[in-house]
Image (cartoon, rainbow, N blue to C red):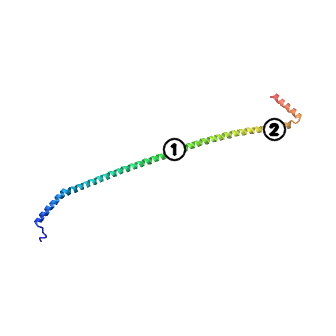
Amino acid sequence: MDLILPSFGLIFWMTLAFAIVFLLLRKMAWKPILKSLTDRENYIKDALNSAEKAKEEMEKLQAGNEKILLEARNERDNLLKEARETKDSIIAEAKVKAQKEAAKIIESARETLQSEKTAALNDLKNQVAMLSIEIAEKIIKAELSTDEKQKTLVKNLLAEVNLN
């Protein structure tokens, strides 16, 4: 049993050795270990703060990107709207121009038709007059073929002149 129970001297020297090791560890090991733990804790806090700042920065950038995208979409929509308005105004202007041009062409055609109609009527009158003269000439030649008929016609004409 002596082997199982320690003696007083052993306990004293073990306690003294433990106290010396404890003091040496406290002086030399605990301070650097605690310092390194504190440093690591500070490093982790700084890393977490940096990560939080980076996250906030990313959120700001994302919000900025969304704003830029929204502005780009609005600008695109405005450009498309302006393009549509320009297209519509060009089409309307072309329609008006075409209508004016068509009106000019129709008026020109009317004037041409009127002048051709007038020319055709004048030509027809001239031809009718010529035919009438030829017919009258033939009738007069047939009627006045003899001297007696000519004298009778002259007397009738003289009588009419005196009456008027």
In the rendered view of the protein, which quadrant contains the N terminus? bottom left
- At a point 10% along the width and 65% down the height, the residue shown is 9
Question: Residue 94 appears at what percent x and percent y?
Answer: 57, 43
SS label for mark 1: helix
**Residue beneath disc 1:** 86
Q: Depth check: give the residue in front, 150 or 76.
A: 76
User: Within 10 angstroms of label 2, few (less than 14), some, or many (20 or more) residues?
Assistant: few
- At a point 15% along the width and 59% down the height, the residue shown is 20
- At a point 19% along the width and 57% down the height, the residue shown is 28
In the rendered view of the protein, which quadrant contains the C terminus? top right
**Is 39 on the left-hand or right-hand side of 110?**
left
Q: How many marks?
A: 2
128 shown above or below 1: above
41 shown above or below 118: below
Residue lying at the far bottom in this picture: please name it: 1
- At a point 73% along the width and 39% down the height, the residue shown is 121
Question: Residue 26 appears at what percent x and percent y?
Answer: 18, 57
Q: Depth check: give the residue in front, 65 or 14.
A: 14
**Residue beneath disc 2:** 134
User: Within 10 angstroms of label 1, few (less than 14), some, or many (20 or more) residues?
Assistant: few
